[in-house]
Amino acid sequence: MANRYQDTKIKKDSTGTRAYKPTIYPKISIENSDIIIKSIEGDRLEILAEKYYGDTSLWWIIAAANNLGKGVMALTPGEEIRIPGDTQSIYNGLKEEEYV
């Protein structure tokens, strides 16, 4: 799977400074293919992404599906976490979103 920033547009301000436009994440609907787990001591988003997707860079899908805030990587033991099953359609939704 490709990097989630590969299709992010670049903008320039009046001084010519370049910056990435914000990435708008798609709404991740609950699907039958989703897995619900209870986190254990030491669980982190990138560890779960590696375990379920074989790719640590897909941690953001788990974060977005569970409405986890910016900077959250470590999970509280016993927390119910949804692992979306259809990562390809989520990634495709990311590419189709309008950039602000």
Image (cartoon, helix red, strand yellow):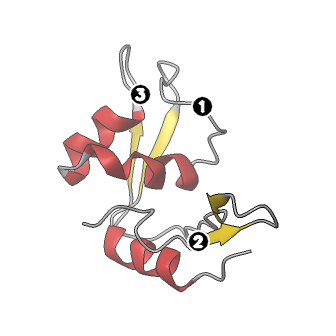
Residue 41 placed where, x, y %?
Answer: 38, 13
N-terminal label among 3 and 2:
2
Q: Residues within 10 Å of mark 2 (few under 14, many from 20)?
A: some
Vertical position of residue 3 compared to residue 47: above or below: below
For disc 3, the marked residue is: 39
Q: Marks 2 and 3: in contact by CB < 8 Å?
A: no
Residue 35 as seen in the image, left or right of residue 90: left
Residue 14 placed where, x, y %?
Answer: 82, 67
N-terminal label among 1 and 2:
2
Q: Residues within 10 Å of mark 1 (few under 14, many from 20)?
A: few
- Tell me the tag on residue 26: 2
Q: Marks 2 and 1: in contact by CB < 8 Å?
A: no
Q: Which residue is at 29% across, 33% downward?
A: 47
What is the residue that sits farthest to the right in this orientation? Answer: 14
Identified by mark 3, the residue type is Ser
For disc 1, the marked residue is: 71
Residue 15 placed where, x, y %?
Answer: 78, 61
Q: Nearer the viewer, mark 1 or mark 3?
A: 1
State the separation of the CA atoms marked 1 and 2: 19 Å
Where, quadrant-wise, is the N terminus in this rendering?
bottom left
Identified by mark 2, the residue type is Pro
Q: Which residue is at 49% across, 29% downward?
A: 73
Q: Nearer the viewer, residue 65 or 78?
A: 65
Identified by mark 1, the residue type is Gly
Q: Residues within 10 Å of mark 3 (few under 14, many from 20)?
A: some
Residue 10 as seen in the image, left or right of residue 87: right
Q: Which residue is at 62% across, 41% downward?
A: 68
Q: Nearer the viewer, residue 29 or 92?
A: 92
Q: Nearer the viewer, mark 1 or mark 2?
A: 1
State the separation of the CA atoms marked 1 and 3: 18 Å
Vertical position of residue 83 compared to residue 98: above or below: above
What is the residue that sits farthest to the front in this orientation? Answer: 15
